[in-house]
Amino acid sequence: MPRRLLYPLATSVASIMYLVMPEARRNAKENMRRVLGPGSTRWQINKATWQAFHNLGRYGADFVRDHRKLEGRITFSGWEHLDNALADGKGAILVGLHMGSWELGAMTIAKRRYPMNVLVDKVYTEGFSKWVQKMRSKFGMKVIAVNDGTPRMFRALRNNELLAILVDAPKHAKLHVNFCNSRAKAPGGPAALALRTGAKIIPAGVFRASGNKFKGWFQEPLSFEPSGDFKKDVQELTQRIMDTLEQTLKTHPEQWFMFRKMWA
């Protein structure tokens, strides 16, 4: 199906999801309220939530139709930050949020012959999850399952490869951080990996732009000097990660696919 027909169909399905999934809708609205801030109106929150569902529909349409058909529609900035980080020989950890089209970004990186690993969680049923991971592998990524991937993550970084982790994962989060002026949970894994291996942490993301195009970016690696207190360092580096990604989130909140509770 051509994209000009697929996108309207996908957004129609997303509209139905918005109506028939009350818990996801409530969670998304609460999350948007936090992101948009105390001055946001109910209309602004509802609009951003509605747009998030629609953008999720488009994301799903691109995934099913195959992200490779979007090659040439994405521009990336900050490749030098990737190269500089890998020059140390200790790998690099890309951290981001469930926003825009992270699979398209990972595929684009892999196409440029960077060794690309992505940490993934199970998606719905076991069978559907296997199909999703098979598709991701087809895009050129090395898929690492979150439940048993610790040795593979260490091995990837020792081999000077890239490891991509989406950190808005309340299911696996154990640390409390300040996020959008409220107490939220975040996983300490990326910070712990970086401290254990010496790998640089690079905030990154891909946004959907006008004209069915995409913009990707890599920021400079986060600067952090360990104190020697590992637990304290993991907490502080995780907070630094979330502070950086918060600024990104506020520029495109309608592209954030978070339908689970992020805040207490």
Image (cartoon, helix red, strand yellow):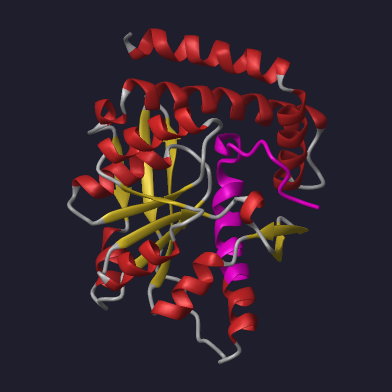
- Asked if the stretch drawn in magenta spans residue 261, the answer is yes
Is residue 16 among what the camera can see? Answer: yes
Q: Answer with left or right where residue 143 lies relative to residue 235.
A: left
Residue at 73% over, 57% down: 184
Position of 118 relative to 225 (above/below): above
* Left or right of residue 139: residue 28: right
**Residue 153 drawn above or below residue 64:** below
Residue 132 sits in which quadrant? top left
The x, y position of residue 49, in whole percent, is: 68, 29
* Nearest the eye: 220 or 92: 92
- The residue under the point 81% across, 34% down is 41
Position of residue 103 measured from the top left corner of the image (x, y, whole percent): 38, 40
User: Is 193 located above or below residue 114 in the figure?
Assistant: below
Task: Give the x, y percent position of residue 178.
Answer: 72, 63
**Relative image position of residue 227 (x, y in whole percent):** 57, 91
Task: Name the outermost residue toward the left.
Answer: 113
The reply to whether the magenta stretch includes residue 251 is: yes
Label the magenta part by its dominant secondary structure. helix
Q: Where are the magenta residues, as a range? A: 238-264
